[in-house]
Amino acid sequence: MPQFFINSKEVVNNKVVISDKENYNHLAKSLRIKKGEKLLLIDENQIQYETVVENVTNKEITVYVENSYKSSRSLDFRLYLGQSPLRSNAQSIIVEKAAELGIEGIYPVFTDNCALNKSVIEKKIDKWQRIMYEASKQCERAYVPKCFEPSTLEDIVSLNKNGYKVIAFCERLSQISLHKYCSEHPVQKDDKILVIIGPEGGFSDREFKLFEKNNIPMLTLGNLILKAETAVIVALGNLIYEFENYRKN
């Protein structure tokens, strides 16, 4: 069963009354939860609650808290994605998988070869936020990542001056592999890493020059040319692996 997000103020004397329409409908009408069943809840402080259902009415669900603890379902470093949105279902897959892989936020980036107009991107922010919310519930994430408003590539690149380690994946003009980069610049606990993935048509010459001018490392994921949605999953997954591998050593 997926966990459900609540507010810490709803926890009173080891009980929680679930009455908001969305959670109630999902639990009572979709999942048909019954008295005695187990339910996972989590609040804005990343405190997870193991509960058991005490009562179900036509308006609310009352649960008893059997155990509570700080959730461990988050990365030890802060991972962000700056990505040029794709058409149709591909973008929904990217947003969903990025949330599953633990990002804190995604920046939709309007690039020179972006598949969508900026006005279209703006209209899809709420949809993508909703997808990440549902993915976070399913994967028992400690918090829901944020889908930011559309940004320019210049905006994203400038974040390297604000405490972010910004890296770009550019298969055609890559300078170094992700593994070698992480060996030379290990990901540390609490680092803010922002991964840039371009559109299906790749970055323009102007954008490559922008990376060079701002000393943004241009990395490769190997000899294979990956579709944009595949590159996102591989890049984020490998970064997480490199962090875990460095920490063990």
Image: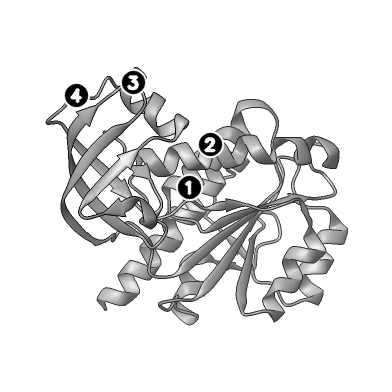
| Sequence-earlier tag: 2 or 3 | 3
* Nearest to the observer: residue 56 or residue 29: 56
Picture quadrant where residue 121 is located: top right
Quadrant for residue 56, please give it.
Answer: top left
User: Which residue carries the number 4 mark?
Assistant: 34
The answer to whether one can see residue 142 in this image is no
In the picture as drawn, the residue positioned furthest to the right comes out as 206
Do the residues bearing badges 1 and 4 touch, measured as CB atoms within 8 Å?
A: no
Q: CA distance from mark 4 to mark 2?
A: 27 Å
Measuring 69% from the left and 54% from the top, which residue is drawn there? 172
Q: Is residue 180 left or right of residue 164?
A: left
Decide: marks 4, 2 in contact (CB < 8 A)?
no
Mark 4: give few (<14), some (14-19) or many (20+) Cα within 10 Å. some
Picture coordinates of residue 129 (x, y %)? 59, 42
- For disc 3, the marked residue is 58
- Reading the chain from its start, which is encountered first: label 2 or label 1? 1
Find disc 2 in the rendering and name its residue: 131
Q: Secondary structure at mark 2?
A: helix
Q: Within 10 angstroms of label 3, few (less than 14), some, or many (20 or more) residues? A: few
